Image (cartoon, rainbow, N blue to C red):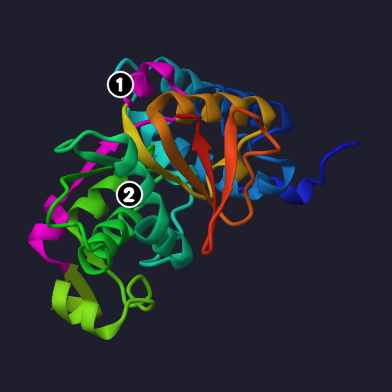
């Protein structure tokens, strides 16, 4: 069935053909594991046209060759930044944070030797609300935080989002779910109605650019005890999901846990994780 012409946005005389859309979609999928459905056509075309014009190319063919073979990869990263969605806020799906401090960390410590660091990976971390929420929750609600060293690593494929995360500057909407006393304790007012996270909290998270579907980038991600991977797998097809899940498994210590988004399920993808049902959340555990 032919696609409707209305799904091909134009900017002047420039437009993306069906064949060009398919070519870009396949390329982006191979590089990131994210596949755009036809329903995302307008979203993709609009951003492609934006970059074609922004780089001064005559059309898709010239631009695609330039982007694909550019040695630095900077233009492809620009596209990744445009094509990925960063929708998040502090204490999102707070029930999982409660589960972390009330149940998961106690089991993690059971497998660790005295003095070993608890390692937590947050991804995709977007603009930082999730990893900073983890740090805040540990500081305020975990009784052992003064006796156990914790390392928080946060990663995303979007370099622009990572830069914003490091700045620690957040909108009213981002902090709207935080208790007022936490907002007053750890944030200070900033121009434009924003809130700036204190330096100590910003320094507590190590941000990295990582593509979960690139084995060369993920092979160094090992020995984690908890992984927050929320609302990412829903953007992957079955093959990319299997690759991502294997990456998560390899990154975990024996007995470690993965926390997914509320609409995601590991059981539909693989049987290598054990389903654990706690009072506050369902999580997935690597066998000890």
Quick check: 247 left or right of 5? left
Q: Does the residue at mark 1 contact the one at mark 2 (Cβ under 8 Å)?
A: no
The quarter of the picture where residue 14 lies is top right
As helix, strand or loop, the secondary structure at mark 1 comes to loop
Report the magenta residues as a range.
197-222
Point out the frontmost of discs 1 and 2: 1
Q: Earlier in the sequence, mark 1 or mark 2?
A: 2
**Residue at 31%, 28% in the rendered image:** 223
- In depth, the one of 20 and 27 nearer the eye is 27
According to the picture, the residue beneath numbered tag 1 turns out to be: 220
Q: Is residue 147 visible?
A: yes
Q: Give whichever of 129, 41 is nearer the camera.
A: 129
Q: Residue at x 30, y 72 (%)?
A: 171
| Quadrant of the rendered image containing residue 197 | bottom left
Is residue 74 shown above or below 45? above
Residue 151 is situated, as x and y percent measured from the top left of the image, at 21, 43
Q: Residue at x 45, y 19 (%)?
A: 68
Say whether residue 207 is magenta: yes
The answer to whether 55 is drawn above or below residue 196 in the figure is above
**Tag on residue 161?**
2
Task: Inspect this view and state whether residue 154 appears.
Answer: no
The Cα atoms of the two marked residues, 1 and 2, are separated by: 22 Å
């Amino acid at each position: 069935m032919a696609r409707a012409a209305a799904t091909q946005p134009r900017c002047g005389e420039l437009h993306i053909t069906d064949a060009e859309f398919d070519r870009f979609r396949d390329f982006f999928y191979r590089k990131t594991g994210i596949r755009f459905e036809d329903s995302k056509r307008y979203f993709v075309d609009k951003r492609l046209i934006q970059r074609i014009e922004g780089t001064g190319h005559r059309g898709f063919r010239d631009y695609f060759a330039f982007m694909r073979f550019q040695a630095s990869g900077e233009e492809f990263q620009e596209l990744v930044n445009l094509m990925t969605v960063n929708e998040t806020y502090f204490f999102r799906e707070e029930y999982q944070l409660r589960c972390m401090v009330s149940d998961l960390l106690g089991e993690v410590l059971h497998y660790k030797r005295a003095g070993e660091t608890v390692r937590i990976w947050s991804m995709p971390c977007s603009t930082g609300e999730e990893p900073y929420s983890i740090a805040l929750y540990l500081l305020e609600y975990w009784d052992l935080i003064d006796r156990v060293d914790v390392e928080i690593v946060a990663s995303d494929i979007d370099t622009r989002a990572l830069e914003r995360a490091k700045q620690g500057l957040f909108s009213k909407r981002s902090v709207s779910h935080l208790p007022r006393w936490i907002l007053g304790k750890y944030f200070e007012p900033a121009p434009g109605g924003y809130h700036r996270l204190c330096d100590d909290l910003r320094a507590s998270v190590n941000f990295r650019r990582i593509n979960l579907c690139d084995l060369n980038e993920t092979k160094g991600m090992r020995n984690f005890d908890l992984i927050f991977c929320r609302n990412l797998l829903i953007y992957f097809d079955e093959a990319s999901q299997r690759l991502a899940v294997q990456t998560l498994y390899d990154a975990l210590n024996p007995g470690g846990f993965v926390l997914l988004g509320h609409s995601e399920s590991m059981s539909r993808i693989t049987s290598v994780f054990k389903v654990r049902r706690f009072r506050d959340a369902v999580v997935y555990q690597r066998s000890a």
